[in-house]
Amino acid sequence: MNSLFFGPNGSGKGTQGAIVKKKYGLAHIESGAIFRDNIKGGTELGKKAKEYIDKGDLVPDDITIPMILDRLKQDDCKNGWLLDGFPRNKNQAIKLDEALKKESMALDIVVEILLDKEIAKNRIMGRRLCENDNNHPNNIFIDAIKPNGDKCRVCEGELSSRADDQDEYAIGKRHSIYYNDTEGTLAAAYYFKELAQKDSSIKYITIDGEPDLDTVKNELISKL
Ligand SMILES: [Zn+2]
């Protein structure tokens, strides 16, 4: 099962992706990790990518797409893959689709997690980290995991927030790319949605990201 996952920052996309990955034995392919591995491994594509990254420029698609394809052909992807963080815009969606077809690689499932922008922003800003354990979820804006006063709801540990999570400007910038439905990430998702309407081998699934994680997870698994 080969799949793409779309969802705004704050939608629980990472958590839901991990559940699907585990259930179906998929390789979780994260686009950022592909860059790091290629640069570390000193591959030709990695060297080219590094030149752009060092200048603070975006790596062009004609470097990114072959890197992703290389990764999807590796052994751990034989049972299928879940590509996370790519494509980020419509142009990349078109190019990825072309590249997959060229390699005769099937795309089976595309998941889109729906979440209102304002709610997504609050969820990011509401995250609190427990000093004792990163896996103790606390969020002042999510009832199911609200801290106990100002302490961790699991262990009463001290809580803090990550600086990135409080950076409204950065969150807004990321969200403006995601929610752009003409050129941005939503446009990429809709490109595959249209493909799925014409091609019954692709299943396009939309999930309501607003309920608690377990409800979202159950809806997702029931639709897969
Ligand atoms: Zn804790």
Image: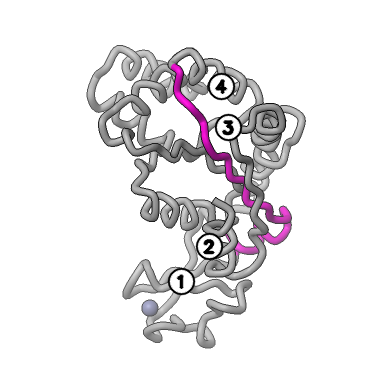
Q: Is residue 83 left or right of residue 208?
A: left
Q: What residue type is labelled 3?
A: Ser
Q: Is mark 4 on a helix, strand or loop?
A: helix
Quarter where residue 29 is shown: top left
Would you say the residues marked 2 and 4 are in contact, meaning their CB atoms lie under 8 Å apart? Answer: no
Badge 1 local density, few (<14 within 10 Å), some, or many (20+)?
A: some
How does the figure colour the protein chain or chains?
one colour
Image depth: mark 3 or mark 2 in front: 3
Q: What stretch is highlighted in magenta?
A: 104-125
Q: How far apart are marks 4 and 1 (CA)?
A: 36 Å
Say what secondary structure mark 1 lies in: loop
The stretch drawn in magenta includes residue 152: no
Determine the quadrant in which ligand 1 lies: bottom left
Question: Gap in Å between the C-alphas at discs 1 and 2?
Answer: 16 Å
Q: Which of marks 4 and 3 is nearer the N terminus?
A: 4
The residue pinned by badge 1 equals 137
Question: Which residue in the protein does label 4 denote?
Answer: 97
Quarter placement of the N terminus: top left
Task: Write down the residue under mark 3.
Answer: 201
Above or below for 113 versus 92:
below
- The mark nearer the N terminus, 2 or 4, is 4
Q: Distance between the residues labelled 1 and 3?
A: 37 Å
